[in-house]
């Protein structure tokens, strides 16, 4: 009897673990899908642009969002797009990229913060 109960418990536990695994896979799958739908989003976190280099298509939009408690700006080195105002926490800045090429940018408050947008045809 004890053995049977123990087996049942193990079986129930196995089911629970299997279910959890499936749920995790489902969540991971959704996250993967979100990443593959091109949003061209750059997060500013811990004084860095993430991703630091992003490849987009000409005519796409690129949106930065500031996740730091510090203000940051986005300034194009080659003046390929208008510069942002100082972004407060959770504030966004969006541009539409034009001609194909490499758009280097930086934060004018913290010039060591740099990023690159590679614009393809
Ligand atoms: Cu900054």
Image: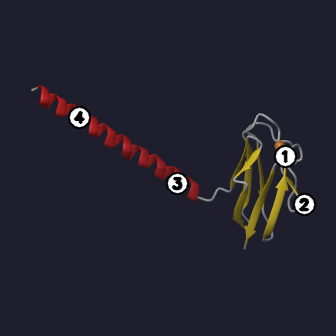
Query: Which residue corresponds to mark 1?
Result: 73
Location of residue 11 (image quadrant): top left
SS class of the residue under badge 1?
loop
Query: Which residue corresponds to mark 3?
Result: 32
- Expressed as whole percent of the image width and height from the top left, the position of residue 85 reads 87, 45
Q: CA distance from mark 3 to mark 2?
A: 34 Å
Q: CA distance from mark 3 to mark 4?
A: 32 Å
Whether 75 is drawn above or below 12: the answer is below
SS class of the residue under badge 4?
helix
Identified at 80% across, 37% down, the residue is 88
Can the viewer see residue 95 in this picture? yes
| Circles 3 and 2 in contact, beta carbons < 8 Å | no
Identified at 80% across, 70% down, the residue is 99
- Sequence-wise, the earlier of marks 1 and 4 is 4
Q: Residue furthest front?
A: 3
Can the viewer see residue 58 in this picture? no
Q: CA distance from mark 1 to mark 4?
A: 56 Å
Q: Residue furthest top?
A: 2
- Sequence-wise, the earlier of marks 3 and 4 is 4
Q: Is mark 1 within 8 Å of ligand 1?
A: yes
Q: Quadrant of ligand 1?
A: top right
| Circles 1 and 3 in contact, beta carbons < 8 Å | no
Mark 3 vs mark 4, foreground winner is: 4
Q: Quadrant of the N terminus?
A: top left
Query: Which residue corresponds to mark 4?
Result: 10
Identified at 82% across, 48% down, the residue is 113
Instruction: Say the numbered circle drawn on residue 14.
Output: none
- Expressed as whole percent of the image width and height from the top left, the position of residue 83 reads 87, 52
Query: Which residue corresponds to mark 2?
Result: 79
């Amino acid at each position: 009897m004890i053995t049977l109960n123990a087996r049942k418990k193990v079986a129930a536990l196995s089911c629970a673990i299997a279910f959890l695994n499936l749920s995790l896979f489902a969540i991971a799958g959704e996250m993967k899908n979100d990443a593959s739908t091109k949003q061209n989003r750059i997060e500013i976190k811990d004084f860095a642009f993430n991703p630091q280099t992003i490849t987009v298509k000409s005519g796409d939009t690129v949106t930065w969002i500031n996740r730091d408690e510090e203000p940051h700006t986005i300034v194009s080195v080659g003046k390929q797009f208008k510069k942002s105002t100082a972004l407060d926490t959770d504030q966004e800045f969006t541009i539409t990229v034009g001609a194909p090429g490499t758009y280097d940018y930086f934060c004018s408050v913290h010039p060591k913060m740099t990023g690159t947008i590679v614009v393809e045809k």
